[in-house]
Amino acid sequence: MILRARWVVPILSPPIERGAVAFDAGTITAIGRADELRSHDDAVDLGDIVLMPGLINAHTHLELSCYAGRIAPTDFWSWLDALIALRRAPGAAPMEQQAIVDGARQSLLAGVTGVADISRSGTNLAALRAVPIRKIAFIELISGAATPPGDPEQLLALLDDALKSADDRTTVGISPHALYSVAWNDLRRVAAIAAERDLPVTLHVAESPDELEWLRDGTGRTAEFLQRYGLPNARAAIRGNWMDLLSRAGLTRLRPVLAHANYVDDTAWRALTGSAASVAYCPRTHEFFRHPPHRWRDMIAAGVNVCVGTDSLASNPSLSIRAELTELARGAPDLPPQTIVGMATRRAARALGLERTCGALHPGLAADLVAIELPTHRSATPWAAILDESCPVRDVWVAGRRCVENGSYVE
Ligand SMILES: [Zn+2]
């Protein structure tokens, strides 16, 4: 199959005007100018379209999609209390299962072909099987949690089930929730499990200033939160800077994806910029919680691999990564658009260990493709169309299979 388009944006090289992408059995075989790419296969001319690699959401919780708009912007701990109350309400579990499917479909419609999705119960993979999206399904551990997994053994059991049902569009990973909610020994055990099985790891770090206060003094709203829910307080076993703790737990060498990293002091900065960890910045969720400006630009300049996530619909109006990128571009008009778009393509793929699978248009990579309509004025650049959500996503392919056609989801 060959797709021709007014613009092809490979990401690893400059956009090609009147370009084409050829793929076979789900894998890209060639890319170039339309008049140079010839084949006996079917060729489809998409017209005034920007054809680019599918976007990757590096941090989300699709199971919370059913709580869209249910919690008004507030401080992090009040938000978490409200979220826990919603999740404990009768009927929440089946609603959350459906939310995973709905969230994955919404993602595809927004041009997101890959989701790094964290699930509290580890059932996201079973739910996601119904949706042809590329998934990195993380199972989340909170030590002492009433809903399993509450310890590494329960995590292992869920992990075995998930690994048995994985397919070529699926990666299974582990997410120890955060330093304050995972006991120190559990954290070290999780790092060992991930190292042994070569599994991707992600966790929430430095999300609120209270978390840093707790790490420093063992006091404040984090300690109150743990006490309120009867969770073990790991502070007695750990002391130090969060990057230092991640390193001592054996996590930094696993190239973890660190969600948020909103509050990075000089000590953490030195360790972060010298580490193999990636950061998943969630711009609109960051705004929802009114955190001070994130240092993502400084991080990129210092060589940190920064990618983009939405977090969940409980703190974000949509699962559109293009909306996140548009927000970033608005606040950084001097930054080349390819740097910003790269955060949801090649950088995200690298963060999730998928750089040999997706994140760019290149022979040998999967045919995860998004077709975005160009605005009617012919002078519009492909970057401007990508970074403008009023230019709709028309078609989406994952591993060569069309999942969105003319803006509608295809079963
Ligand atoms: Zn999160």
Image: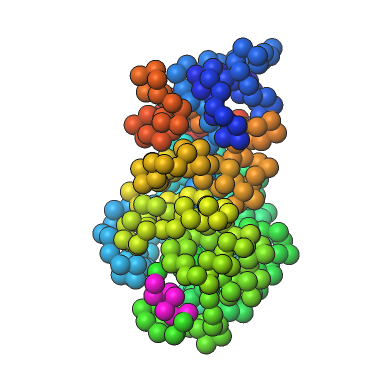
Is residue 369 within the magenta segment?
no
Please provide percent x and percent y for residue 59: 49, 54
Above or below for 252 versus 395: below
Please provide percent x and percent y for residue 109: 43, 36
Image mark count:
0
Question: Who's the residue at 46% across and 60% down the image?
Answer: 260
Above or below for 340 versus 97: above
Q: Residue furthest bottom?
A: 236
For residue 303, what is the image quadrant?
Answer: bottom right
Query: Is 70 displayed left or right of 259 in the figure?
Result: left
Please provide percent x and percent y for residue 334: 41, 41
The foreground one among 270 and 351 is 270
Question: Who's the residue at 30% across and 67% down the image?
Answer: 75
Please provide percent x and percent y for residue 354: 64, 46
The foreground one among 376 and 87 is 376
Q: Residue furthest right?
A: 196
Q: Which range of residues does the magenta coloring cover?
A: 209-215
